[in-house]
């Protein structure tokens, strides 16, 4: 049992022992593992510590780096500041030693330093402002010194009165130019040169300042530079001449000094003669008076004088070569003479053109040829000296003077264009004259007859070809007529404008047109074309201006409307042949059919017609208005009705009479008769319509209507008075039936009003009588019914009207 | 009144100014003569009934103005005329020469081709004759016109001129009947019209 138990126990024991051995092994490996883990932990902790240390080191490094950068920057700024300071110091010492050029250079250096400082962003150093102010002050200081130096060199003596520039006052203008340097300046080199070079540097400053953006500073420096260049600083001018001086525009004023007191008077007053007085230390430029009788000086003289003045300036003032090198600047340098030229040239050339060249432009073409010869010579000389470098001889002068840049050829262009200037001037004169004529009164009239209508033979030019041509055509024409063997020859007046009255201004206008064309024939091609088109412009202007300008009067006054109508027809009449007359005398460019006015003819005819027709409509309206108060001509046995009708007819006749009077001698006779006939016709036609529409006409009514009609028939023709000679009008009064379409109708109506039934039937004559020609059967029947009682006889008569 | 009248005929008197157109008319209608008669203005009109071969005809006579200045009015008078009296002055050759113009005008404005024309040489009472009777006759024949010489002053040939003209018109078929009897186109008369005158062809078309 025990053994059994033991044997049973032993395997248990053995497995227990085995387990113990395994647990031991396990705990050992656990120990090992723990030791490993502990080791690992210790390592990682150490690593972390090192990393932290590293970060700190990096941060430190960055900080140090930034500090270094800041320090470097501050160092550079300080360097610049030092440069600035040095430059200013240098400048100050240079200025004291009167080394203006160096001073200006230093100033420029300082400025560039400052500019660089200011261009850095993010640094708002208060010192920069102060430095800027300092620089400005120093610049002004420099300019002041320069100005003082300059004043010694160039002194103005101006006339006392500044309000007007009279030739006398101009005589007192003087310009003193110092030629000898004073002793102390001798040491510092020629002051003129140094002052000018300094200016040149400032001149460069000028452009810099502009881009720099400090407008006011730039402006002040600019102004000062201008002043200097024009030899005056405001304070000195003030003290010397007590000029009323606008502080806001000093540069303009200064520009004007040279122009106003020297150059412009030279251009305007031909008797002024500039001359130079050389003394030991000064050169004086002043005027003396010569030949005060001249009105305009010739361009030659003026150019000589101006050249003289500029040469004096050049010799004594500006001949210093502005060779001062600003080595580090590559921009092209502006020389002093050029600068001066730049500033005054535009105004000077304008002045030359307006006061000298314009006056010398001839007003007619015969003088033009002469001008071209003389003018070109002048301009050749001038041109070469001032502008073109083509001639070697003048190349030196040009280089010396350099008032002009090579490409400035304003004057030359102007002079070369003398033809077009002549034409422009002429055209302008022509149009102005034409416009004046068009806006002058219409009612000043002249009588145009077929004999007087050709304005051309009056023209003074004996070479007028139209004379010859007209004779030619009149010789040729009859021969052709003979060949045709037509015995009814055309009257010589067939194509003439009928006798009428036109405005005196329009006759003058036409003369102007002919004169201008005549002048065109004698002109150069370009001028000819321009003149030709300005003549066309005259007519286009007329077309537009006259109806508008005189609109109200043309509507209101029938006489003016008639004159305007005539004016238009007169112009149209001339336009028909005007082109042909000059056809072979104008330039070849215009000869190919372009030189015509015929295209304007329909427009002018329409213009005249429309105006007159509008007036006719007004008058017609008035007539109808008056007749409308006649109460339809009904119940004439009523006194009141009769007197109203009577009055209406009297009014119409009065109106026609008045019209007949104002159109008398004005309208061409045929137009007059047509117009009056149309208006009378309006009245008669209206009366006929009203009477024919009546339903009942008593015997008394008929008598009274007849008497009213008789007034019209008797007095109507009397309003036809186309001619002032009373005895000559009878003819036209007889012809009234021709001009008044309804005349016969009216007469037939009168016959009916007085006729018996038989007489009416006779007038009808089976539709072959005059009554049938004027009235329809219905109208006649209606009238018969109105006039006659309903009887068998009436019925019989009515039956015949068909 | 005038029921027995066969027809009304439109007669036109034309010719140069001063040849005596109005005098002829006045002599014919009123049997008067005025040596100082004023120039006609525009147109005059007279009605007279005349009896030819037992046929009564009413004449609507249009006396036109001869003066050039009234010519613009005349074209309308030609309308519907059936007979025309063309007058010249035998003492003024120019009035004879101008006849061509008048014929031309007549042809231009006349609305029918078969209008009957009568040429009258007036003022044969005067002594200073410039146009011979034969010249007139020749001219009339050439243009198929009736011809007569007359004097309004002495009454010579006046009545005759009108009578012959009317006679000829009445004898001309288609010239007057259609109008007086029936307005418009008569289809039944077509054959007759066709044979009678050149205008027949046109009528059917109208």
Image (cartoon, coloured by chain):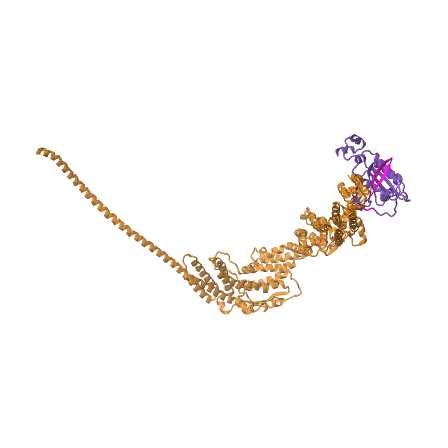
- Which hue belongs to chain B? purple
Asked whether, in this view, residue A590 is left or right of residue A29, the answer is right
Q: Is residue A260 left or right of residue A663?
A: left
Q: Is residue A156 above or below residue A587?
A: below
Chain letter for the orange part: A
Residue A78 is drawn in which quadrant? bottom left
Q: Front-most of A670 and A546?
A: A670
In this view of the protein, can residue B75 be seen by the observer?
no
Q: Quadrant of the N terminus of chain A?
A: top left
Residue range of the region highlighted in magenta in the rendering:
B40-62
Residue B41 colored in magenta in the image: yes
> Residue lying furthest left in this view?
A2
Q: Quadrant of the C terminus of chain A?
A: top right
Tell me if residue A422 is in the magenta stretch. Answer: no
**Which residue is found at the position 33% from the left and 54% from the top?**
A62
Is residue A603 something that shows in the picture?
Answer: yes
A255 relative position to A545: left or right:
left
Q: What is the x, y in percent for residue A200?
A: 50, 61
On the image, the x and y values in percent for residue A79 come to: 40, 60
Nearest the viewer among A643 and A341 is A643
Number of numbered labels in the structure image: 0
Q: Main secondary structure of the magenta part?
A: strand
Residue A118 against residue A695 in the figure, above or below:
below
**Residue A609 image offset from top left, x and y in percent:** 71, 49
In this view, the residue in front, A232 or A404, is A232
Q: Position of residue A751 (x, y in %)?
A: 80, 45
């Amino acid at each position: 049992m025990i053994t059994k138990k033991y044997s049973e126990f032993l395997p248990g024991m053995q497995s227990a022992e085995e387990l113990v051995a395994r647990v031991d092994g396990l705990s050992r490996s656990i120990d090992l593992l723990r030791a490993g883990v502990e080791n690992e932990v210790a390592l990682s902790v150490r690593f972390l510590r090192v990393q932290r240390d590293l970060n700190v080191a990096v941060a430190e490094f960055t900080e140090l780096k930034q500090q270094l950068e800041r320090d470097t920057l501050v160092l550079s700024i300080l360097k610049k500041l030092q440069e600035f300071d040095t430059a200013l110091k240098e400048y100050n010492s240079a200025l004291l030693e009167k080394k203006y050029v160096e001073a200006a250079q230093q100033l420029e250096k300082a400025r560039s330093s400052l500019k660089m400082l200011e261009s850095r962003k993010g640094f708002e150093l208060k010192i920069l402002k102060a430095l800027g102010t300092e620089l400005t002050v120093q610049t002004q200081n420099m300019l002041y010194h320069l100005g003082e130096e300059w004043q010694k060199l160039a002194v103005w003596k101006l006339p006392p009165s500044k309000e007007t520039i009279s030739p006398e006052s101009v005589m007192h203008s003087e310009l003193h130019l110092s030629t000898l340097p004073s002793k102390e300046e001798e040491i510092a080199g020629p002051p003129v040169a140094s002052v000018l070079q300094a200016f040149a540097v400032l001149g460069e400053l000028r452009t810099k300042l502009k881009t720099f953006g400090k407008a006011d500073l730039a402006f002040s420096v600019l102004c000062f530079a201008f002043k200097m260049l024009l030899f005056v600083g405001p304070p000195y001018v003030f003290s010397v001449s007590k000029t009323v001086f606008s502080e806001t525009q000093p540069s303009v004023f200064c520009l004007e000094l040279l122009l106003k007191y020297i150059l412009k008077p030279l251009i305007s007053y031909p008797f002024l003669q500039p001359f130079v007085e050389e003394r030991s230390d000064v050169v004086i430029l002043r005027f003396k008076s010569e030949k005060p009788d001249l009105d305009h000086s010739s361009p030659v003289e003026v150019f000589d004088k101006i050249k003289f003045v500029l040469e004096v300036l050049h010799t004594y003032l500006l001949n210093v070569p502005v060779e001062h090198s600003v080595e580090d600047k590559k921009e092209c340098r502006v020389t002093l003479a050029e600068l001066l030229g730049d500033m005054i040239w535009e105004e000077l050339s304008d002045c030359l053109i307006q006061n000298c060249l314009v006056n010398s432009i001839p007003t007619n073409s015969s003088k033009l040829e002469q001008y071209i010869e003389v003018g070109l010579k002048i301009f050749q000389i001038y041109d070469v000296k001032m502008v073109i470098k083509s001639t070697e001889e003048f190349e030196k002068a040009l280089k010396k003077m350099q008032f002009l840049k090579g490409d400035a050829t304003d004057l030359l262009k102007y002079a070369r264009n003398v033809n077009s200037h002549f034409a422009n001037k002429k055209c302008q004169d022509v149009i102005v004259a034409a416009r004046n004529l068009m806006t002058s009164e219409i009612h000043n009239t002249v009588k145009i007859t077929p004999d007087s209508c050709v304005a051309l033979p009056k023209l003074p030019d004996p070479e007028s070809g139209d004379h010859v041509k007209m004779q030619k055509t009149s010789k040729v024409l009859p021969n052709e007529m003979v060949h045709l063997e037509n015995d009814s020859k055309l009257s010589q007046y067939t194509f003439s404008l009928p006798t009428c009255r036109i405005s005196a201004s329009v006759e003058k206008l036409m003369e102007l047109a002919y004169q201008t064309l005549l002048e065109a024939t004698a002109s150069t091609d370009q001028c000819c074309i321009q003149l030709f088109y300005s003549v066309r412009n005259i007519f286009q202007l007329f077309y537009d201006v006259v109806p508008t300008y005189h609109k109200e009067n043309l509507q209101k006054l029938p006489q003016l409307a008639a004159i305007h109508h005539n004016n238009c027809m007169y112009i149209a009449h001339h336009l028909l042949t005007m082109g042909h007359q000059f056809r072979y005398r104008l330039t070849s460019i215009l000869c190919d059919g372009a030189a015509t006015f015929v295209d304007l003819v329909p427009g002018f005819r329409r213009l005249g017609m429309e105006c007159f027709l509008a007036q006719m409509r007004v008058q017609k309206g008035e007539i109808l208005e008056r007749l409308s108060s006649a109460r339809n001509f009904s119940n004439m046995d009523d006194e009141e009705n009769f007197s109203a009708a009577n009055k209406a007819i009297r009014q119409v006749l009065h109106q026609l009479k008045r019209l007949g009077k104002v159109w008398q001698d004005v309208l061409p006779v045929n137009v007059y008769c047509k117009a009056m006939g149309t208006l009378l016709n309006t009245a008669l036609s209206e009366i006929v319509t009203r009477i024919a529409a009546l339903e009942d006409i008593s015997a008394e009514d008929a008598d009274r209507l007849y008497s009213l009609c008789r007034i019209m028939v008797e007095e109507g023709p009397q309003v036809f008075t186309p001619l002032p000679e009373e005895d000559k009008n009878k003819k036209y009064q007889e012809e009234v039936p021709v001009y008044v379409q309804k005349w016969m109708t009216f007469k037939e109506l009168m016959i009916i009003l007085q006729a018996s039934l038989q007489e009416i039937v006779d007038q009808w004559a089976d539709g072959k009588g005059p009554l049938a020609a004027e009235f329809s059967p219905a109208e006649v029947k209606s009238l018969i019914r109105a006039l006659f009682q309903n009887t068998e006889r009436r019925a019989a008569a009515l039956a015949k009207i068909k | 009144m005038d029921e027995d009248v066969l027809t009304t005929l439109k007669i036109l008197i034309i010719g140069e100014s001063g040849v005596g157109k109005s005098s002829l008319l006045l002599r014919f209608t009123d049997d008067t003569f005025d040596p100082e008669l004023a120039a006609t203005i525009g147109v005059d009109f007279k009605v007279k009934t005349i009896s030819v071969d037992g046929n009564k005809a009413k004449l609507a006579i249009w006396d036109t103005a001869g003066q050039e200045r009234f010519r613009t009015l005349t074209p309308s008078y030609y309308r519907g005329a059936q007979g025309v009296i063309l007058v010249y002055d035998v003492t003024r050759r120019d009035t004879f020469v101008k006849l061509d113009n008048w014929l031309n005008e007549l042809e231009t404005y006349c609305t029918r081709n078969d209008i009957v024309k009568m040429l009258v040489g007036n003022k044969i009472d005067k002594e200073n004759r410039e146009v011979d009777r034969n010249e007139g006759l020749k001219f009339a024949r050439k243009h198929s016109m009736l011809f007569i010489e007359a004097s309004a002053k002495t009454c010579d040939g006046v009545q005759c001129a009108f009578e012959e003209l009317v006679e000829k018109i009445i004898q001309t078929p288609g010239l007057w009947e259609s109008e007086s009897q029936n307005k418009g186109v008569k289809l039944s008369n077509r054959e007759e019209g066709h044979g009678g005158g050149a205008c027949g062809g046109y009528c059917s078309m109208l």
